[in-house]
Image (tube, rainbow, N blue to C red):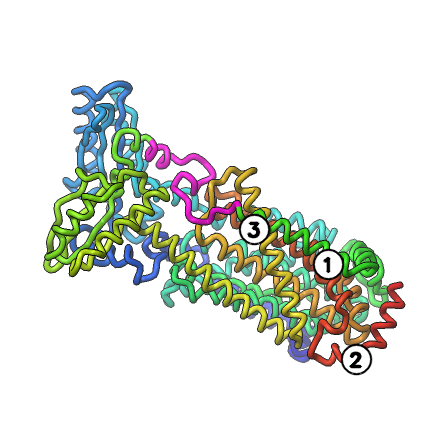
Amino acid sequence: MNRQVAGWITHRWVKWAVLALMLVIVAGLGSFGGKLASVQDNDIASWLPDDAESTRVIEKAGAFYDEDTAPAIVLLTAPDRVGPQDLAAAKSAVQDIGALEDVPVGEVVGPIPSEDGQALQLIVPMTLDEEGWEELPGWIDEVRDAAKSAVADTDLRVDLGGPAALGADQAESFAGIDGILLLSAVGVVVVMLLLTYRSPLLWLIPLFCGLMSVFAAQGLVYLLAKYADLTVNGQSAGILSVLVLGAGIDYALLLVARYREELRHYEDRHEAMAHALHRAAPAIFASGSTVIIGLLCLVFAQMNSTAGLGPVGAAGIAVALLLMLVLLPVLLVIFGRWVFWPFIPHFGDPERTDVGIWARVGRGIAKAPRVVWVVTSLVLLALSFGVVKLDATGLSNAESFTTTQPSVVAEERIAEHFPASAGDPVQVIANADGAAEVRSVVAGLEGVDTASVTPPQTKGDLAYFEATLTVSSDSAAARTAIGEIRDAVDAVDGADALVGGNTALNLDVQNASSADNRLIIPIILVVVLLVLMLLLRSIAAPLILLVTVVLSFAAAMGISALVFRYVFGFEGADSSFPLFAFVFLVALGIDYNIFLMTRVREESIVHGTRRGALIGLAATGGVITSAGLVLAGTFSALATLPVVFLAELGFTVAIGVLLDTIIVRSVLVTALNLDIGRRIWWPSRLSRPQEAQREEKSLASIA
């Protein structure tokens, strides 16, 4: 940041105007934050690209059924066999459920008896409006209560399954996600700030700015979703609060640490902050910009949900940057030095870069830097082999939750008495002329319950029919069956058949996510490399740092895969998981590279690379470690939700950040700096031979 601009932000009179302006901006954006849930789109179809086959089926099938309806399956099971009294009670349940609001009149199907005579099934369509996702849990409770009341005089057991019941369980899992995650993350941040600053007062200022960043970011994202057609769902909204709070506190830690240093050099706190901003703001801005650019790379994704997370996260980071570079310094100078009590930095206090744990670590590394980086690299490489245990090919409904859900229990019980995919059919759209042949092909396929294939309905040039799979609709076998059905109907000349339904949607999600992994990860690597080259004015250093980032990511994935399988007992991971983990670990991991290497470069200009590396480590090791612990703690808050994807993402990011801050950034990168020396800055002037004399002096001082 330009020194004059930094000076004006914290000027003894202008600071009050800046404070007033920032509070107006925060209040204005924050007033919209509470409305974010109202613009979320959690329908799985909205996550997919428009050209996905299952998406096209939804568009075309609107002529045959209301696409805003979702079926629930009411399963009634008897201890032995269904008797006349049970059947009469089930018919009464049909009438009572059909009278509920949002149930289309006369469209409750059943009771359908099972072949084993032990169960009855009712299929209940629900009409969803714009707020249907939030209303699903309450609606499912109404259906359950109506069914239980109708069969109260019998021994029938009531279970609710099907897409609507599953959606209700998902909605409840995400209910209050912003509040739960924010409270969990705030608790972690408070503890870490107290441990870092050892002050009863100082932690309040960064925390206030962090919370204001979250509320303002939520408001900005609401406006983008409302007026700029940005896709936001419960997943991205939850990640937003964690990301903004964690990254914002990271930036605050770096600025406060530099401000504390400058308070020893300048008697006037306004001047001290101006110099702190001038020195620290470029690194903070570069770090935030790298995260923003990395997140925006997600817009190239096929998955609308993934593409939407990019702008959502980028907007949040931009807000965090603004508040931490403007509001935070203004508040710090307003409160003055006493806010650091009891460890108040005074003008003239000696600056010690040769004491502390990280100074000692640096001196230890300097004794044999090559041995340190080789051994560290080999250990990280060994840990990365655990990734062979990661099965990122998708999760079934049961595998998607960390706790047992009623809809999943119902699915299992339905499969005991009816075809496994009952109530969740495959949907087929074809040209009317070829529909009969397409139906015949589908009915003859293995894995399709032949008796369940409905007659084609024809409207205009299109025909529509449904079929039920013999395997559970959320299983890997079902997705394989969808692929076989698509291959078979594609072979019918002129039919132009399309295969959709929830199983097809899940298959398209997994395929699109896998394609996004292959496309986005290389793009992010190239973008990060270019940003580092511009920032460090070097080619060698960015290439080396990028290798360390990839190695850190691989090790984090390896550790996570082993923990998921052998500790948590998770069956696998979603196909999008590697990309999400990569984006957050690489984009945020680069922050710590930038924090360290910009300081090392600053010190190298004066002291030479080797001495600069040790000073840089001693000066930033503590703040980087604190920042890493804060970010790891905030992301671990994702594990408070009963959703496997978020629990896995939170754990992996937390482990990866800890590896980055404690091992990779502070040990591996420092060892590489010491071993490679001035050549790490090639081709900038710092790599030129005239630096050799300073290198020799720095070696002598280390010895």
Residue at numbered disc 1: 373
Regarding residue 54, the answer to whether it shows in the image is: yes
Q: Residue at x 43, y 46 (%)?
A: 174
Label 3 and label 2: CA atoms lie apart by 41 Å
Eyeballing the image, is 665 above or below 84? below
> Earlier along the polypeptide chain: callout 2 or callout 1?
1
The secondary structure type at the circle numbered 2 is helix
Q: Position of residue 601 (x, y in %)?
A: 73, 72
Q: Secondary structure at mark 3?
A: helix
Q: Which mark is residue 689?
A: 2
Of residue 495 and residue 46, the one placed in the foreground of this image is 495
Q: Which residues are magenta?
A: 389-412
Q: Residues within 10 Å of mark 2 (few under 14, many from 20)?
A: few
Q: Which numbered disc flags the more N-terminal residue, 3 or 2?
A: 3
Of 179 and 53, the residue lying toward us: 53
**Could you tell me how far apart the alpha carbons at marks 3 and 1 are, in whole angstroms?**
20 Å
